[in-house]
Image: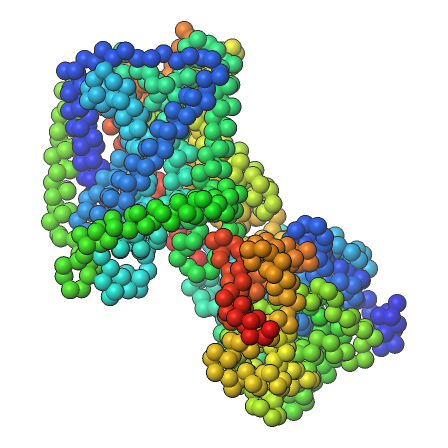
Amino acid sequence: METDALLASEGVTSQPLLKVRHVAKLFRSADGSSRVAVLDDIDLDIEPGEVVALLGRSGSGKSTLLRLMAGLITPSEGRIERDGQPLRGVNRDVAIVFQSFALLPWLTVLENTAVGLEARGLGEREVRRRALRALAMVGLEGSAEAYPRELSGGMRQRVGFARAFVMEPALLLMDEPFSALDVLTAENLRRDIDELWAGGTFPAGSIVIVTHSIEEAVLLSDRVVLLSANPGRIRGVVPNPLPRPRDDTAPAFRNLVDTLYGYMTDPDKPVGSSPLAVEQATSQDALALPPASLGAVVDLLTLVPEQEGISVAELADELVLELDDLLPILDAGELLELMAVDGARLGLTAVGRALAEASEEEQQRLLRSQLMLVPLVRRLQEALEASPKAEVEGDFVLDLLSEQFTQPEAEAMFETLVSWIRACGLFRYSREQDRFRASDALENGQDGQV
Amino acid sequence: MLLDFALLLLGLTVVVGIGSLSSQMAVSFHPQAQLPGVDLNPLLLPYYAARSSLRMFIALGISLTIAVAVGSLTARSAVTERLVLPLVDVLQSVPVLGFLAVIVPFFIGLFPGSLLGLESAALFAIVTGQVWNLIFCYHQSLRTIPAELREASRVYGFTGWQQMVRLELPASAIPMVWNGMMSFAGGWFFATQSEAISVNNSNYILPGIGSYVAAAIAQQRLDCVLWALLMMLLLIVVTDQLFWRPIVTWSEQFRLDTNSAANPSQSWFLEALQQSELLRQLGHWLGTALLPLGSSLNRWTRSRGRDGPAPLQKQEPRWVDNVVLLAGAVATVLACHHSLEQVGLGETLQAFGQGLLTFGRVLAVVGGSTLIFLPLAVLIGLRPRWAALLQPVMLMLASIPANLLFPFFTVVFLFCGMPLFYGCVVLMAMGAQWYVLFNVTAGASAIPNDLREMSQVFQLKGRQRWRRFLLPAMFSAWITGAVTASGAAWNASIVAELVTWGSHTLQTPGIGSYIAQATAHGDQPRLFLGLVVMALFVVGTNRLVWRPLYRFAEERYGN
C-alpha cells in the first residue's frame, strides 16, 4: 500500500491509534434509486501524540468521518481498525467535544463532567475528585454547582472540554468545537487549548479536530488533512511544523494560512506532493448549485478592485465572513462566469465587471443571460419550452436533483434555484401550485435576442 | 392557592346550579318521543358512521367558534382573563359524561317530540369534551403573538375584522389545527357514548355507530361489535387522509417563524385539490362574491379612536380577587349545606371513599401504562424511521373510542370470572394508555441527536443511562401524557365501573359507577354529589400533583 510505504519511510514504528482504510459512507439518494457517496475511499492513520485537523467545505463529510472514527456510525465500505482490531460499536478510546456542547440541561456542571466516569463504575469520591480537577483545568471550579443554562456559551463549551478531559481519552475528537461561539470567546478558548497542548499537560493522547476555519487548523494541528466535497475524498495532507505555542501574526503562520486558502478556493488544485489525482468534475457536480444568494454574488462583485483582484483570505477577514459562507458565493460567481479565482486571488471576468457597474435593470438582464450557463437552469428552460402551457411542475426539477443527491441536499438546491430565478425574474415559481412558469420578462428577452 | 380553590368551588356551584335548573325544566315537559331503534345489519353501518361523523364535525365547528369568541375576550380584558380562565380550567375537569346526564333531559324538553333534542345533547357532550382545551389554546396563541406584529397592526390602523382575519386567526392556525385534531380524536369517545344513554330510567337512542354498538351489546352480538370497530378504524383513516392531513399541510403556511418546518407534512389530497382548475375558479368566484361582506365588516369594526384597537393586557382591578374570594366562601357554605341536607354526612363521606377507590384505579392506569410503555417508547422514539412510521399509527389507536372495545373485555371477564374490581382498570386503560405511549414516544424522539451521541460516546449504560439521561429527557413529555391519560381514565370510569353484556351486568364500587347509577335512576342529589366529588379529585390532583411537577420540570429540565 502506498500509505504504508509512506509511513515506513518516515520511520514510524509505533502502532497507529486508529487506521482508516478505504472507507466509504453512502447515503440513499432522495428518490431512493441509488446511493450517494458522502465519503469515498478514505485512507487515514491517527498516530499517538499528534493533532490532526480535518479541513473541508460543507459537504465534504468531515463530521461523518469523525463519527465513523468514534464508532457512532459504521462505514458502508472499507474498515476502521483500533489497535489492529476492527472497530465494533462505539470506540472506547475516544471522547468527543460537540459543536452544540451536548450538555444535559438537568445535570449540574459537576454532574455533567462526571457522567463518563460514573459510567466506568468508579467510586463516588474518586469521580468527584477527578471531575473537580478537570473543571479546574478549564477554569470552572467555581461553577461546579451551576446548571448549564446559567452559563455563557463559552463556559458551556468549557464544560464540554472538562467532560472529555476527565476521561483522559487516547483520542479526543472535536467537532467544530468553536463554531457556535462568538469570535472573541472562540479565540480565547482556542488559545487555552493550544497552551495546554504546548505545555504537555493535555489530558488526551491525540486530537482530531473537524473545522472549516483555516486559522483554527493552522493554530492547533500538526498536520492538516484536506477533504474535497461531493463526495468527500482526501485531497492531500499538509504538514504543519510551526513551533508551539503559535503566533498567528508570524509570517510563517500567515504563509501557511495563505497556502491553505489557495487549496480551499480552488478545488481542482493538487495538494502538495499528494499522489491522489483529483477527479474530473462528474456529471453530478454539473447539476449542483452552491447555496448562495444572487444578491450576495452581486454585492461581492462591487467589492473586488477591478484590475488587481483581491486575496480571498483578506476578503474573508474584511467581511468577517466564515470561509463556509464565503466559498459558496465564490462558487456561484464562478458558475455564472462572473468571477475567476486563481490561486487564492479573486478577480472579475469581463461580464462580472460589466455587471458591477450596470444599472439595476441591466444587472437583471445580465444575470438572466448568465443564469443560462447553469446546467440545471438550462434543463428547466428546455422543459418549459417543450411544455404546451409553458408550465413545469416543481417535481421535475426535484426529481432531477434527487437522482444524484440526498434529500436535504436536493431540497436545498431546489430552494437555491427558486431564489435565483426569482431574483432576476428569469422564470416564475408558485409554491402553492408547485409549478414553474415562463415569465413575461423572459419572453421579451427572447424576442429581443431573436 | 386559596384563590384557586375559591374559583374552583364557584365554578362547581355554577355547574350544579345550571344542571339542577335545567333538569327541573325538563321534568315539567315529560317527553314521550317516538325513538327509532337500531338495525344491526352491518350493511347499514356506513350510514350510522356518517351520522356520527356529521355530529363530530358540527361539534368541531361549534367548539372552534366558541373558542375563538371566548379566547378573544380573555386575551383582551384582564378581568375576563382572571375570571374565565380558571372557570374553564375547572369545567375541563368535570367529567363530560356527567354533564351529559344533566343536560339530556333539558334538551329533550327544548325540542319535544323531535330527535333534535337528542342531537343537541350529543353535540353538547362532544363540545364539552373539546371546547375548554381549544379556548386555552386560542387564548395562549393570542398572547404569544409577537408584540411587534401587534404594534404594526395598530400603526397601520387595522380594523377589528382585519385584526382577526389578518393577524389573530393566522397566528393561531397551527396550534389550533393540532389541538383540534387531538380533541377530535378524543371526541369520538363522547360521540359514541352519547348516542345511547339511559337517564332517569328511560333509554334515549340516536342513530350512530355508538348506538349500534349499544344495541349489539344488548343482543349479545360480538360479531356486530367487531364490524363497528372495523368501521370506526376506516372512519378514522378516512377523516385523517381527507380532512386532517390536508388541513395540517395547508396550515404550515401560517408558521410565524420564517424558517420552515423540519419535516413538512404532505398530503396527496391537498395536492389534488390545489391542482384542480375547477376549484381554483370556484375559489376565485367565491372570493369576489364575499368581497362586499368583508368590506362591510371592515366598516363596522373600524376603530373610533385615533390609535386603533385598544392594546391588550390591561391591569386587572384589585376588587376582582376579593369578589371571587367572597363568592367562593358563600358557595362553600351553600354546597356543604345542600349536600348535608339532601344526602346526609354518611353518604357524602361514602362518596368520597368511592372517589378514593377510583383514584387508586386512575393511578394504576397511569402507573401501569408508564411501566409498560416507557421502554417501548424509548425503543421506538430513538429510531427516527420507526418513530415516523409508528407515530401516526399510535395517534389512530388513540382515536379509537375505548367504549367500542369494552364488549370484548366484558365477554372475557364474564367467561373467566374476573372481578370487575380489577378488570375495570384494564377497561379504563384502553383509552388512556395511548396518551402515555404517544407523548413519551414523542419525548424520546425529540431528544437531540448530539445528546444521544454523547450518551453513546461516554458509554452511559443501564441504570445510569435511565437515571441521568432518558428519564429526565422524557419527563416533561411524560407529564403531558400522564395528565391527559388520567383525565381520560376519570371519564372512562363512568362507563368502565358498570358494564353490561346482554342481561349480564358487572359492577364494582367506585365514583364512576356511583355516577352511572345515579344517572340511570334519575337520582339528582346523588348525581351532583358524585360529579362534585369526581371534579374535586380531578382538580385536586391537577393543582397539587401535576402542576407542581410541570413547574419543576420547566425549571429543572428546561433549557
Q: Position of residue A234 (x, y in %)?
A: 75, 70
Above or below, B22 relative to A293: above
Q: Position of residue B59 (x, y in %)?
A: 32, 33
Q: Is residue A361 left or right of residue A79?
A: left
Above or below, B426 relative to B521: below
* Count of numbered marks: 0
Residue A384 shows up from this direction: yes
Q: Is residue B483 left or right of residue B526?
A: right
Above or below, B541 relative to B100: below
Q: Is residue A297 left or right of residue B78?
A: right
**Quarter of image, res B147:** bottom left
Image quadrant for the N terminus of chain B? top left
User: Which residue: 28% across, 64% down?
Assistant: B152
Relative depth, front residue between A369 and A43: A369
Above or below, B75 relative to A297: above
User: Which residue: 79% across, 66% down?
Assistant: A43
**Quarter of image, res B399:** top left
Q: Position of residue B394 (x, y in %)?
A: 51, 36
Q: Position of residue A47 (x, y in %)?
A: 76, 70
User: Which residue: 17% across, 58% down?
Assistant: B303
Question: What residue occupies the far top of the structure in this picture?
Answer: B503
Colour mapping: rainbow
Relative depth, front residue between A272 and B59: B59
Residue B549 shows up from this direction: no
User: Which residue: 67% across, 73% down?
Assistant: A55
Image quadrant for the C terminus of chain B? bottom left
Relative depth, front residue between A67 and B42: B42
**Quarter of image, res A284:** bottom right
